[in-house]
Image: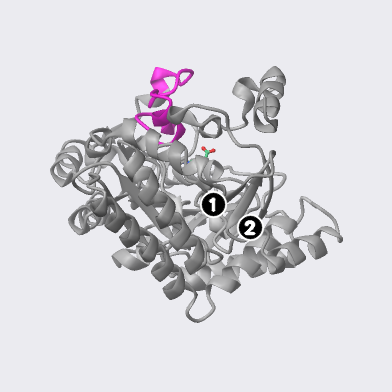
Amino acid sequence: MNQNQQLFAAAQKHIPGGVNSPVRAFGSVGGTPLFIKKGEGAYIWDADDQRYIDYVGSWGPLILGHAHPDVVAAVISTAKNGMSFGAPTALEVELADLICEMLPSIEQVRLVSSGTEATMSAIRLARGFTGRDKLVKFEGCYHGHADSLLVKAGSGLLTFDNPSSAGVPASVAADTLVLPYNDVAALEQLFAEIGDKIAAIIVEPIAGNMNMVQASPTFVQAMRNLTIKYGAVLIYDEVMTGFRVDLQCTQGLHGIKPDLTCLGKVVGGGMPLAAFGGRSDIMAKLAPLGPVYQAGTLSGNPVAVAAGLVTLKKIREIGFFNSLTQQTNKLITGLIQVAKETNTVFNAQSVGGMFGFYFSENIPVSFADVMNSDRTRFNAFFHGMLNKGIYLAPSAFEAGFVSAAHSDEDILNTLAVAKIVFTEI
Ligand SMILES: N[C@H](C=O)CCC(=O)O
């Protein structure tokens, strides 16, 4: 047994399934997960000292690459003054100001510790604000693991073939109405029937938890128009896409002003930090100002905030996003090219530093399309790449990420390996 296998065996003794989040168990692709020893730039090393070019980036946060020196320095210097106070700090005011400056739809913001907390709190707030209970979500979108959101969800649930979790009371799930992604007619029909009972739509405006699926412009516009018409709240879940696809996130690309936005991942620079924010009249309903309760001992944790601040400042530097977008594009066009050269049925797309690839003729626009892609081939490709030092997300239902640390050489090496693996599979 190698070190990874030994650690996995040991982990299973006291950690259910040997992992602290299900997709880490290598989901549908099977095998032993890598136990990571260290990361630097675009690379990670496993317990057997094998190096990999990493396109997971801790599932999105590491837009600057692993252990970026400025982020590490900020974390160390902040931690030296104390790890947590459970009291306000100047740093969190600075981060809140910066988020509001970068995202015009956010007039006020609250910091929390995970994407799940952000979406869960935004939904409670939308319900408190509207006085309504019904929530609209879309098939294949994943918004964290709060009870009401584990209905036909993506990410680890899909990976393990159980898109609606056990343990969610039917009464809770009853208020979650699930529609197909990108289906304008279904959305219009639902609003025509019960629009005055709907508190909110929550959507991943570029879905990253059923692989990567983009919302069409008509779908996006329909969500905005209908929520305005019926007085419902439009929640953009940009936990994955926030500061990852564009400096102004997906909402900047769409030219849409959501009522509330959920952020996570990049905003914390690799530390447990997330946020939700939006219209000040809605945010004013939060305690201690208003009747909607939301709280957290570690919310706005100074060490996490320090990492987030450095990360956001770096990605605002001139040329950062252009270069990240170009680098991701090189990977995607290169993969499409080598697939063509090896007669492999394959497709791929990217926005900013986020990408998806599919063993299918067309780019998927719905959950059903993703389900129809060739997942057996995906698994073979994943293992082939992993065995040759390329670490991709171990699930056909997750997006991939390029960081500022991925060099031309890394991309070329990845493409050379992909060509071999496409031929093998
Ligand atoms: N897709 C998930 C989050 O965005 C992957 C991370 C996890 O579930 O552990």
Horizontal and vertical percent for residue 1? 67, 24
Whether the magenta-drawn stretch holds residue 162 is answered as yes
Q: Amino acid at mark 1?
A: Asp
Identify the residue under disc 2: 66
Q: Are marks 2 and 1 in contact (CB under 8 Å)?
A: yes
Q: Amino acid at mark 2?
A: His
The mark tally for this picture is 2
416 on left or right of 344: right
User: Residue at 26% across / 56% down in the picture?
Assistant: 224
191 on left or right of 239: left
177 on left or right of 60: left
40 or 210: which is nearer to us? 40
As drawn, the residue found furthest toward the bottom would be 318
Judged by its main secondary structure, the magenta piece is: loop
Instruction: Locate the C terminus and report the quarter of the image it occupies.
Output: top left
176 or 335: which is nearer to us? 335
State yes or no: Cβ of the residue under disc 1 lies below 8 Å from any atom of ligand 1: no
| Closer to the eye: label 2 or 1 | 1
Horizontal and vertical percent for residue 55? 49, 52
Quarter where residue 136 is shown: top left
| 147 w.r.t. 363: above or below | above
Q: Is any atom of residue 260 visible in this view? A: no
User: Residue at 25% across / 54% down in the picture?
Assistant: 341
Of helix, strand and loop, which one carries label 1?
strand
Magenta highlight range = 148-171
| 125 w.r.t. 351: above or below | above
Identify the residue under disc 1: 54
307 on left or right of 251: right
Horizontal and vertical percent for residue 18? 63, 25
Q: Earlier in the sequence, mark 2 or mark 1?
A: 1
359 or 421: which is nearer to us? 421
